[in-house]
Image (tube, helix red, strand yellow):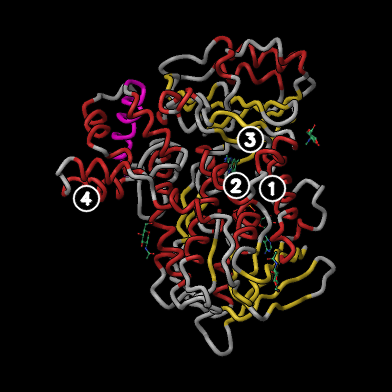
């Protein structure tokens, strides 16, 4: 939702230096590198690397990485304890039943990796809809830029339950021709060892297979940590003798609870829901983010795959509904600059009264954490180890960036591999450092923006060395930015593109956008 302090500062300095107007405007509006690199995503290299790539973790990040690496390595070994029985609901992913919003960059990337993505996801019951979740900040509409697209049709994204998306993505991975060289090993990665002849790289990976046998993979080309919240890579590297700085992992506590109610809605009941027609073909017909003065809380309604609808509620307090009778009272207590619309209450009332008892999935969101591999002194990290997805950076999920961020990591990885000489057989010494540095420059803004926004709430506990005062300037700018987006089309369009990760943050710093933001007083 916001933008980062350091990057505003750096980018505005850079932009101001280029005050020659046009240069500034062009610099800040050209497509980011990762969008240009989408064209290379899904393209196999001519001559593959002969060694094995090991993907540790088989959830979203793992699936994307296995698909990318199959384009570059002769052999991909794909390890996760829960790949044993694909049909079974996952138990190691806390958020498996939590409502997920999938941003545009995720869908754009998935279409490159799997040209049949749309067809297969629709066959699984998913909906391809306008990438608009009808965002309201404290009750006030922040519009999506339909006017910027031919025929007023916004780029589309996927609306579905996470479980449906994850199973369908796994099926797509296994159906892809490149999958012939992916070996699925249900099991757990236990650790890594430095190579005998090159201590700057990982030489073997040990795995405990599902049947209890231990195996070591010894011809390691690349190891990718995709273990999510576990962030197991830190432990593996330390145990193998790679010296990581003590403060490599930083974290803060947002102290948020997250509830997902999932309703089965028959088409008969659906036809009676008073949802405005114009809001149906979208991820969400209504989403509201409360002002951080009221804590970190919000409400999103989603029509998901097959006949399901999900109501997502989050709050800094332990006050989320656990039964149907508590839902309307919870929603009625929402505070803001404008109330939730009355049709929204009617819709939720109908869902609660006429549908079968919904499922409730109430969880406490864990600490948000960032393993700053990019800050490790040169030469310390093994050249053939990287981390993708939450194993590297775990953002506050209420901003819906997790899948898109894993895609951004996958794009970076693919581009770096394509940039290597065609005959290369071993990754260069600085491969890992280059991956983490490129990546940090692309994702650090997400960490700053979400974290500094969260510090606005009384209940948030900042990371070591920071206080709730940290980022005050960013929050001041953010509230002016949101206000300007409610008034000016070009500001709304830039904010929407940055939110969906299809523009870099400096899209908010073009002369035209920046002066409107600075000129507009905050409504909030
Ligand atoms: C409540 C909540 C709501 C969210 N909402 C959204 C949203 O709206 N939109 C969005 O894009 N994102 C959302 N996210 C974030 C998103 O769920 C994560 O970013 C995403 O799941 C990260 O994927 P991952 O593959 O990195 O990790 P995970 O999905 O956590 O998967 C890690 C995998 O690693 C495996 N593993 C662990 N240790 C080992 C080992 N030693 N060996 C082998 N395998 C191992 C586990 O079994 C698991 O399969 C939400 C998160 C939460 C908590
Ligand atoms: C959703 O519907 C599709 C197609 O009708 C079906 O194949 C699929 O199994 C359903 N998925 C779930 C999770 O119910
Ligand atoms: C799989 O690997 C073999 C070499 O081990 C290679 O010849 C073949 O082209 C690969 N197949 C695919 C689909 O990449
Ligand atoms: C060291 C390195 O690879 N840096 C890259 C970081 O990302 C930017 C933008 O994507 C690149 O321009 C740098 O080369």
The residue pinned by badge 2 equals 110
Q: Is residue 109 above or below residue 274?
A: below
Res. 169 mark: 1
Nearest the eye: 12 or 44: 44
Q: Residue at x 57, y 25 (%)?
A: 282
Name the magenta segment's main secondary structure: helix
Q: Residue at x 70, y 13 (%)?
A: 350
The residue pinned by badge 4 equals 14
Find the magenta span and give its range: 470-487
Q: Is mark 4 within 8 Å of ligand 4?
A: no
- Secondary structure beneath dot 2 equals helix
Measure how far apart labels 2 and 4 are at the Cα level.
Answer: 33 Å
Measure how far apart labels 2 and 3 are at the Cα level.
Answer: 19 Å
Q: Is residue 485 magenta?
A: yes
Q: Left or right: 517 with respect to 342? A: left
The residue pinned by badge 3 equals 99
């Amino acid at each position: 939702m916001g933008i980062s302090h350091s990057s505003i500062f750096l980018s505005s300095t850079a932009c101001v230096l280029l005050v020659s107007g046009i240069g500034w405007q062009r610099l800040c509006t050209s497509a980011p590198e990762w969008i240009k690199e989408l064209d290379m995503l899904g393209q196999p290299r001519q001559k593959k690397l002969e060694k094995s790539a090991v993907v540790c973790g088989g959830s979203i990040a793992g699936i994307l990485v296995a698909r990318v690496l199959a384009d570059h390595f002769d052999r991909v070994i794909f390890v996760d304890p829960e790949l044993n029985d694909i049909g079974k609901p996952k138990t190691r992913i806390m958020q498996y039943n939590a409502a997920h919003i999938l941003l545009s960059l995720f869908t754009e990337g998935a279409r490159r990796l799997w040209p049949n993505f749309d067809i297969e996801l629709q066959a699984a019951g998913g909906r391809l809809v306008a990438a608009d979740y009808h965002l309201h900040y404290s009750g006030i509409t922040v519009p999506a830029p339909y006017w910027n697209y031919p025929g007023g049709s916004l780029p589309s994204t996927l609306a579905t339950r996470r479980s449906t998306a994850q199973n369908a993505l796994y099926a797509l991975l296994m159906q892809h021709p490149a999958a012939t060289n992916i070996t699925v090993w249900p099991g757990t990665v236990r650790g890594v060892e430095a190579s005998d002849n090159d201590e700057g790289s990982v030489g073997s990976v040990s795995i405990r297979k599902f049947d209890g046998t231990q195996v070591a993979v010894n011809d390691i080309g690349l190891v990718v940590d995709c273990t999510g919240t576990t962030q197991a890579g830190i432990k593996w590297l330390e145990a193998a003798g790679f010296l990581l700085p003590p403060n490599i992992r930083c974290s803060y506590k947002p102290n948020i609870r997250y509830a997902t109610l999932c309703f089965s809605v028959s088409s008969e009941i659906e036809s009676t829901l008073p949802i405005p027609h114009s809001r149906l073909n979208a991820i969400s017909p209504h989403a509201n983010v409360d002002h951080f003065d009221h804590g970190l809380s919000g409400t999103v309604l989603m029509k998901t795959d097959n006949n399901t609808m999900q109501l997502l509620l989050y709050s800094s307090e332990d006050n989320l509904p656990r039964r149907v009778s508590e839902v309307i009272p919870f929603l009625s207590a929402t505070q803001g600059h404008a109330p939730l619309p009355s049709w929204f209450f009617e819709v939720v009332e109908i869902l609660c009264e006429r549908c079968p008892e919904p499922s409730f999935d109430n969880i406490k969101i864990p600490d948000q954490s960032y393993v700053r591999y990019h800050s490790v002194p040169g030469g310390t990290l093994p050249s053939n180890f990287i981390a993708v997805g939450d194993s590297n950076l775990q953002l506050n999920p209420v901003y819906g960036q997790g899948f898109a961020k894993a895609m951004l990591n996958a794009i970076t990885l693919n581009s770096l591999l394509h940039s290597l000489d065609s005959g290369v057989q071993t990754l260069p010494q600085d491969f890992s450092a280059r991956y983490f540095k490129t990546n940090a420059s692309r994702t650090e803004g997400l960490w700053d923006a979400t974290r500094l926004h969260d510090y606005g709430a009384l209940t948030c506990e900042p990371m070591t060395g920071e206080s709730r005062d940290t980022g005050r300037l960013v929050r001041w700018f953010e509230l002016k930015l949101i206000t300007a987006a409610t008034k000016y089309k070009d500001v709304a369009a830039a904010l929407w593109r940055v939110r969906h990760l299809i523009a870099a943050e400096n899209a908010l710093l073009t002369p035209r956008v920046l002066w409107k933001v600075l000129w507009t007083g905050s409504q909030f």
